[in-house]
Image: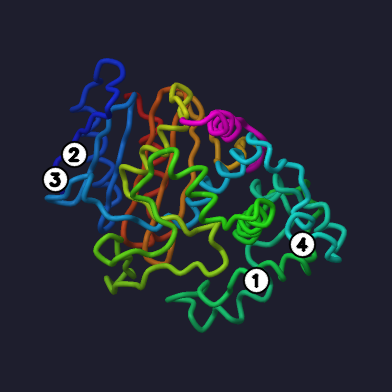
Amino acid sequence: MTAPQEARRTSPGPPPQDYGERARLLADAARTIGAPGLVIALSHRARRTYRLDAGARPGDAPRYELGSASKPFTGLLLAALVAAGRVRYEDPAAELLAPGHPVHPAVRAITLRHLITHTSGLPALPADFYPQALPRWSTAPYSRYPADRLVRAFLRARPRHRPGTRWHYSNFAVSVLGHTLAAATGTPWETLLQQEVLDPLGLHGTRLRPGPPAGDAVGHRRDGTPLPALDVGGFLAAGAVRATPPDLLTFLEAHLPAAAAPTPSLTAAFADVRRPLLRRGLGHAHTHTLTWFRHPSPRGPVCFHAGATLGQQMFLGFRPDTGTAVAAMCTRRVHRTDPFIATMHALLTEKL
């Protein structure tokens, strides 16, 4: 890998910090992880530093599959639509999705807020997902589970817990949210996200479907075998986003309190998604915002979300109190014991 590169945004911000220290931190993180195709993008007080493959430039970097790190985009979309008065957090999802359709009482009680905060009582995936996915588990498990099937699974669901009582991570729930927002507004989720989030933030390198092979990063198995592009089927809102490293830094920088949002609805939305909302984890030591994990650290709270597809890994995080953001990605899904996430989380807590 080459030495880290520094890039200044149009608005340079405060006087620069020690670039050599930032470069050292990124180099140390890269050596700790050792994953193929690793990119680390750091922003501190509007100054950007990149760790890229040899000879690469930030503007030429491909789009990476975000996997579950797509969820903060869907959460921000929900918050923007609420701020614009188009939906409410407490709207019952089933009534927006299929008015008058008979559903279980617990399903009737599930709100948009429950879906995005993983407190709906729904499982991680629909019960009938696994039999159809197993034959394609290592290549395209989501591809043959379309939107209409996912909606039907929600309408006939029997939640495990009463909505709002327990936290349980659910791709199913966030995907239902995407289809519910589309039904409530009469606009496809992809179009909504483009109009309300991607275009206003200038995320012109971000896509919601696979693009030309030359523009998308290729994921790999642990043995180096390349994998096909991710097809998420009906689970768009939970994992469809693909983005470049500069776009991801722009997205994260927009979450920082000092940033100026381009629209009034996004100004309110960013405030909503930064706000602690519920407690979870051992001893309830960790909080969760509308869409971000929020962990304490000696230098202030860290907001982050990770994601993985069959052949790629992603970490997004920011520190509201220090104006710091980190996006990291690699082209191999790392093992549970791999230090990728822990290293990126620790990088955010460094004193810059």
Disc 3 target residue: 2
> Which of labels 1 and 3 is toward the front?
1
Q: What element does badge 4 sit on?
A: loop
Evaluate whether residue 287 shows in this view: yes
Quick one: label 4 or label 2, which is nearer the N terminus? 2
Evaluate whether residue 288 shows in this view: no
Relative to 247, is 296 above or below? above
Q: What element does badge 1 sit on?
A: helix
Disc 1 target residue: 148
Quick one: label 1 or label 4, which is nearer the N terminus? 4
Relative to 251, is 221 above or below? below
Q: Distance between the residues labelled 3 and 2?
A: 6 Å
Which residues fall within the magenta stretch?
Answer: 262-283
Q: How far apart are marks 2 and 1 (CA)?
A: 46 Å
Disc 2 target residue: 4
> Which of labels 4 and 2 is toward the front?
4
Q: What residue type is labelled 1?
A: Asp
Q: Any mark on residue 98, and which?
A: 4
Q: Which amino acid does label 3 sit on?
A: Thr
Quick one: label 1 or label 3, which is nearer the N terminus? 3
Q: Is residue 167 left or right of residue 332?
A: right
Q: Which amino acid does label 2 sit on?
A: Pro
The reply to whether discs 4 and 2 touch (Cβ–Cβ < 8 Å) is no
The reply to whether discs 1 and 4 touch (Cβ–Cβ < 8 Å) is no
Query: In the image, residue 87 lies at what x, y percent?
Result: 70, 43
Circle 2 crowding by C-alpha within 10 Å: few under 14, some 14–19, many from 20: many
Query: In the image, residue 66 lies at what x, y percent?
Result: 43, 54
